[in-house]
Image (cartoon, grey):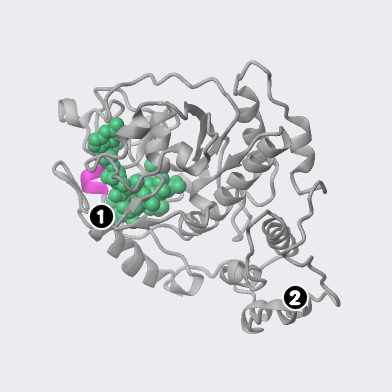
Amino acid sequence: MNGLPPPQMLDRISVVAAIAEYLLEANYRGYQPDTRKVLVVRKSDRTASLREAGAPGGKAGQQHLGQALGVERLRLRPLDQRLEGTVTAYGDLIARHHRSADGNPAWLSAFLADFVAADPRNALPEAGHPAIWEAPLVGIASADDALWQTLRQPEVVGPMHRLPTEWLPQAKSVIVYFLPYTATLRCGYPKRGPLPSLEWASGRKHGEVFNNVTRRALLRLLEAQGARAVAPSIEEDYRAINMRPSWSERHAAFVAGIGTFGIHGALITEKGCSGRIGSVITDLELAPTPRPYTGIYDYCPYPDSGKCGACIPRCPVNAIAAAGRNDRQCIEHGRDTVGDHFRPWGYHSCGHCLTWLPCVDRTPPRTAQQQTHS
Ligand code: B12
Ligand code: SF4
Ligand code: SF4
C-alpha cells in the first residue's frame, strides 16, 4: 500500500493489551465505552478476522468479540457496576507509590516513570512493538496561580478556558506531564518529503490512546491516596471550538514550569518539543515547580535574535512563519495529505515540526545554529 510495507499482523499480546485497556476504561467511573471500541481501536492492526467480522454493540458485541478472539464466552461486567477496590493492571504499581506528607511531588514522577516503562500498552502495534514514550517530565502548578486568569484573555487562549477550580471546586494543584517520543520514533521520521513514517503516524494515534491511559492511571493513583482528581481532557464536557480549548494542556505545562513555546507552536522543554502533554487537577496540596522563565518564547532563540528558524522551512505546507502559524494549512495537510496516504491504517497528522530540529530533544542554546539533532 502506497509503497510502504504492510504493518505486521495482530498478535496475542496486542489483543490482550486492547482488552485490558477496554476493561480498565469500562470500569473507570463515568466512562462507558462502546464494546465495539476494542475492534475499532485495533482496526489498524489489519487482522482480517477482527476487521471483517463487523461490530455489533451490547451483549451481542461481547459475544461477537469473544468469537472474534476465539474465546467461547467473553464476560464483561455490566458497565454500571464498578470494580471498586479490585486489582487493575497498574494496581500493584499504585500500591508501591505513596505521597510524602510535605507535598514533595517526586513520588508522582517516580510513578509515571515506572508506569511508562512497565505498561505493555506503551508500544506500537506494528513490527517489533517499539515503545512510543520515554519517561515523562512532570511539573506542578498551584491552582491559585495568577496565570490561570491570564489564560482567559482573548489573545492568550480565551474566556472559554476554565480555571482549575471550575473543573474541580476544591482544586489545590495541577499536575502536568510531558511524554517525550522515543528516539526510535523520532529518528525514524523522514528528513525529507511531505509524509511521516508509518511508525510516527501510528505513534500519534496509539500514543494518544496511551496518554489517555496515563491520565487515568494518574487519577487512580491520586484517588488511592484519598484525593479527588479530574483530567479535563477526558472529561465529557471538555470542548475545543475553533481550535480554542476549554483546557489547554500546552498552556498548563507553561504554568507548571515545564517549558515555553517555540515559534512552531509546540512547547519546548528540557527534553525538547517532540512529545505530547497530559494533565490532572487535584485537591492535594503539592509543592509547585519553579518556573525558570518569564517570557512565552524564552526557550526559542528566534523571536529575540532571529537565530535558528529551522522549523520554518521544515513545515511541508508553510504553516509556520515569522509572522505566525497558519493552523488551517496544518489541519488540511494532516487530514488530507497524510490522512489519505495512511487511510487504510486510519492514521493522520504530520510531525515535521517535532522532528529534525535543534529543539526536538533539548532546549536549544539561545544562540542555536541551524543544526539538527538525533
Ligand atoms: C487546537 C489544537 C491544534 C490545532 C491548532 C494548533 C493551535 N492553535 O494550538 C491543530 C490541529 C493545527 C494542531 C496541530 C498540532 N498539534 Co495540536 N492541539 C490542539 C489543542 C486541542 C489545543 C491547543 C491550544 O491551546 N490552542 C489555543 C491557542 C490559543 O494556542 P496557541 O496559539 O498555541 O497559543 C499562543 C497564545 O496563547 C500566545 N500567548 C499570547 N499571550 C500569552 C501569554 C501567556 C502567559 C501565554 C502562556 C501564552 C500567550 O502564545 C501561544 C504560542 O504562540 C491541544 C490539546 C490541548 N487541549 O491542549 C493540542 C496540542 C497542542 N497539539 C499537539 C500536537 C503534538 C500537535 C501536532 C504536532 C500534531 C500531532 N502530530 O499531534 C500539530 C503541531 C502544530 C503546531 N505547530 O503547533 C500537542 C502539543 C505537544 C507540544 N510539544 O507542544 C497538544 C498539547 C496535544 C497533547 N495533549 O499533547 N493542534
Ligand atoms: S526550530 Fe528553532 S526557531 Fe523553530 S521553534 Fe525550534 S528553536 Fe525555535
Ligand atoms: S504539524 Fe506539519 S503541517 Fe502542521 S505546522 Fe507542524 S510541520 Fe507544519
Confirm or deny contact between disc 2 and disc 1 (CB under 8 A).
no
Q: Which residues are magenta?
A: 310-314
Q: Position of residue 274 (x, y in %)?
A: 42, 41
Residue found at x 25% / y 55%: 327
Whether 44 is drawn above or below 291: the answer is below
Percent across and percent down for residue 280 are 54, 39
- The image quarter containing residue 34 is bottom right
Q: Is residue 190 visible?
A: no
Residue picked out by circle 2: 62
Q: Is residue 362 visible?
A: yes
Quarter of the image for residue 17 reads: bottom right
Quadrant for the C terminus in the image: top left
Query: Is disc 1 placed on a helix, strand or loop?
Result: helix
Name the spot of residue 366 as percent of width and height, x first: 26, 22
Q: Which residue is mark 1?
A: 327
Using residue 333 as the reference point, say whether residue 276 is left or right of it: right
Three-letter code for the amino acid on which mark 2 is drawn: Gln
Q: Which of label 2 and label 1 is nearer to you?
A: 2
Pick the front one: 142 or 179 = 142
284 horizontally vs 203: left or right: right
Q: Nearer the viewer, residue 261 or 236?
A: 236
Q: Is mark 1 within 8 Å of ligand 1?
A: yes
Report if residue 311 lies within the magenta region: yes
